[in-house]
Amino acid sequence: MTALEADGWTILARRLRTAAGEIDIVADKDGLLAFVEVKARPGLAQAALALSPRQQARLVAAAEIVLAENPDWGFRGVRFDAVVVDARGLVRRIADAFRA
């Protein structure tokens, strides 16, 4: 069980490929849809900063494709989260990491 699942999220997809790029995780919790980008770097701050504006735009474009193909997903809202991992394996989730 992943940390997301332990927190009540249902994993809908992992490494979901779209024409705009790959989405690491798509998860749902009571109708709230989260598109999750996972970043691993030597430090948590470096991992968080690795989610560049260019990557954010790619993730938004990929999410638009997924939502068009699955119109019943995210009926209570959509957000973009990040999961950052450091070299020691410490994991932190940043809920609502950026807005489209």
Image: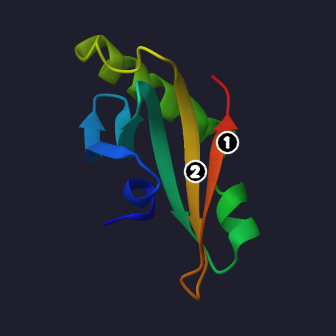
Picture residue at 63% right of the left edge, 22% below the top = 100
Picture residue at 45% right of the left edge, 23% below the top = 61
Task: Give the residue at mark 1.
Answer: 97
* Residue 33, placed above or below residue 84: above
Classify the position of the N terminus by image quarter. Answer: bottom left
Say whether disc 1 or disc 2 marks the residue closer to the N-terminus: 2
- Please provide percent x and percent y for residue 45: 76, 67
* Residue 79, placed above or below residue 87: above
Neighbour tally class for label 1: few under 14, some 14-19, many 20 plus, Cα within 10 Å: some
- Please provide percent x and percent y for residue 77: 51, 19
**Whether residue 67 is visible:** yes
* Residue 37, placed above or below residue 85: above
- Position of 10 with respect to 93 (left or right) is left
In the rendered structure, which amino acid carries the disc numbered 2? Ala
Picture residue at 42% right of the left edge, 36% below the top = 29
- Position of 46 with respect to 72 (left or right) is right
Of all residues, the one furthest to the bottom in this rendering is 88
Task: Give the residue at mark 2.
Answer: 82
Neighbour tally class for label 2: few under 14, some 14-19, many 20 plus, Cα within 10 Å: many
Q: CA distance from mark 1 to mark 2?
A: 6 Å
Q: Which one is nearer the viewer's eye here, 22 or 37?
A: 37
- Please provide percent x and percent y for residue 20: 37, 29
Q: Secondary structure at mark 1?
A: strand
In the rendered structure, which amino acid carries the disc numbered 1? Ala
- Position of 80 with respect to 33 (left or right) is right
Picture residue at 49% right of the left edge, 33% below the top = 58
Q: Which one is nearer the viewer's eye here, 80 or 51?
A: 80
Residue 53 figure quarter: top right
**Do the numbered discs 1 and 2 sit on residues whose CB atoms are within 8 Å?**
yes
- Please provide percent x and percent y for residue 14: 28, 49
